[in-house]
Amino acid sequence: MILLFIINAVSIFGYATFVLNPQLLSHFSWAPPIFAVSFPFFAQSQILLAFLVMAFRCHQDFGKKWYFHLLVALVISFIMEYGGTTYGIPFGKYSYSSFLGWKIAGQVPILIPLSWFFMAFSSYMIAEQILGDFRWPFAKTLLGSVLLVTWDLTLDPAMSHLTSFWIWEEVANPLLKIPIKNLVGWLFTGILILGCFELKSLKIPAKWNDNQFPLKFYAVNLMLPIGFSIAGQLWTSVVATLIVFALCFWISVRTGGLRHFFKTEQK
């Protein structure tokens, strides 16, 4: 994950330095063409590397059991993304630029379903840690879906308002810089994916609790949109994300899940 952190850090630096100050590129004749290539390259590399990290850990600790979760996430997310880019359902109408590479059916970049999988799976595992011994039906599905939406609170404005990885064709909320319908669509899609995860639930490995892999993985992937949002002064999205995390911490205290994040279990 160190390489993933470095890619995110370089991307944030590039955005804060050159995207927000494009006049700097004019000082060097070689800079504009290199930046034009490196900007989409780093974005695509970040998604692909994050998927490979999650896939490696899942293969290592779950064997073949995680294939079901991968297939479910890829199929459902593609259907929803295709519906959004074609019909405006369930997220609202938008289209992807060429920055994320080759598109399935000319609409959805192949990297997008991969990102749905690794963020949905990490959110699902964090939800299990947060809930502890609390086992209300579908609680993990709901909380994991909220964590997934929380990632999008900064991701979507950063990738569509601050940059042009995708373009909205609907009116954005003036505070969040994205249509509210998009967040509803994300919650709905998250519930579908994580609900299917629950049908073949995987118990979080003990070493994932010990080394906090799900939380670290989520945080590293949140780093990029948070960094862009801070640089672009999208404070509403940043504050909303922090509020959700504070709520999750409170839930963790109430349910006993806090022991998975700190060594508080009684011997």
Image (cartoon, grey):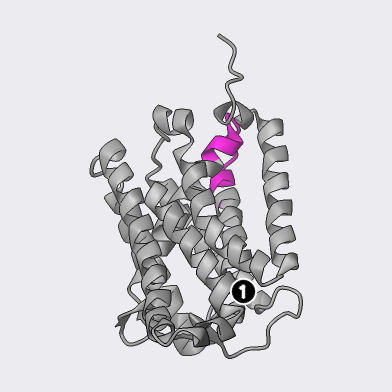
Please tell me whether residue 139 belongs to the stretch shown in magenta: yes
Residue at figure coordinates x 64%, y 77% from the top left: 181
Residue at figure coordinates x 30%, y 50% from the top left: 55
Q: Secondary structure at mark 1?
A: helix
Res. 73 image quadrant: bottom left
Q: Is residue 91 visible?
A: no
Residue at figure coordinates x 35%, y 49% from the top left: 54
For this rendering, which residue is in front, 135 or 125?
Answer: 125
Residue 166 lies, with reference to residue 215, above or below; the image says below
State the residue position of label 1. 157
Give how far across and how far down residue 43 sits, in percent.
42, 70
Q: Is residue 13 visible?
A: yes
Residue 188 lies, with reference to residue 208, above or below; the image says below
Q: Quadrant of the C terminus?
A: top right
Please tell me whether residue 33 belongs to the stretch shown in magenta: no
Q: Residue furthest top?
A: 267
Name the amino acid, label 1: Pro
Give how far across and how far down residue 34 sits, in percent.
38, 80
Give how far across and how far down residue 61 sits, in percent.
30, 36
Residue at figure coordinates x 76%, y 80% from the top left: 174
Q: Residue furthest bottom?
A: 169
Q: Which residues are magenta?
A: 128-141
Give how far across and how far down residue 75 sits, in percent.
34, 67
Q: Residue furthest left?
A: 64
In the image, 144: left or right of 36?
A: right
